[in-house]
Amino acid sequence: MLHSSIFKILLKMDECSTIIVVPHVCVLPRSMDNGCDHRSRRFAEIISSEISHSKLFIGDVARMKTDLNREEGKNTGMRRNLSAYMLKCSNNGSNSTVIDVHTFPRLGFDGFQNVQVLLIYERDSKLARLILRTLKKETKLRVEMVLGDGNNDIIIQAEKLNIQAVLIELINTMDVNDVKNIARIIRTII
Ligand SMILES: [Zn+2]
């Protein structure tokens, strides 16, 4: 009896968590790191706290130095840890999900001026479509979905390993309660 519970605990430990990645953290004062996502770390931490057993990977390199969401970022410490974790999830057949969290300023995206949540996918739109549909149904947020430009290296890498992945851009000015609500909705989907 005792043995089987220990075995179950060990199995649980080996299961893969939801992977939350936040590559564009402002590690320097904002004026020195043009293009970093200054609310992304806070929002990713909120999302992570709403999704139990999620694993958070936080960027530690200034975006102006190396963009962790590009191929050039692959050899950084954060991307190497992320790669090792995703590989483990892929190899043990876990149904894992990658959520790549970004934030953007108002008027940050041409053509998406009124959008508060932008979902970006690269190869497989299934997860993004499901989140889009549910957020539109269950919140008043202005949500859109778009195909990425082929350079969102983190979600591309995840999908190559058969891990479903979506990049989520949240407007900087979003209320933390809306972020919590989005996380709770995503939790019911993944
Ligand atoms: Zn970003």
Image (spheres, grey):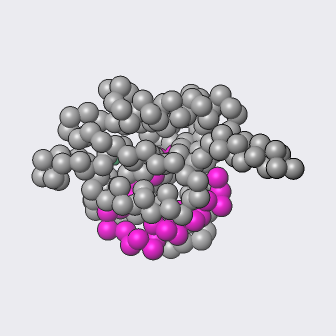
The picture quadrant where one finds residue 51 is bottom right
Q: Is 74 rendered above or below residue 100? A: above
The residue closer to the viewer here, 47 or 1, is: 1
In the picture, measured across the screen, residue 34 lies left or right of residue 115, that is left
- Residue 174 percent location from the top left of the image: 37, 68
Asked if residue 172 lies in the magenta stretch, the reply is: yes
Query: Can you give x and y, in whole percent of width and height, for residue 69 in the image?
Result: 37, 37
Residue that appears at 59% across and 31% down: 88
Residue located farthest toward the right when viewing the structure as drawn: 1
The residue that appears at 18% across and 48% down in the rendered structure is: 28
Q: How many marks?
A: 0
Q: Quadrant of residue 60?
A: top left
Q: Position of residue 36 (x, y in %)?
A: 25, 48
Q: Is residue 122 magenta?
A: no
Q: Which residues are magenta?
A: 166-190
Residue 116 visible to the viewer: yes
Q: Report the residue at 42% width, 56% height from top.
A: 44
**Farthest residue, direction left:** 31
State whether residue 15 appears in this view.
Answer: no
Q: Residue at x 61, y 69 (%)?
A: 137
For residue 112, above or below residue 14 = below
> Quadrant location of residue 77?
top left
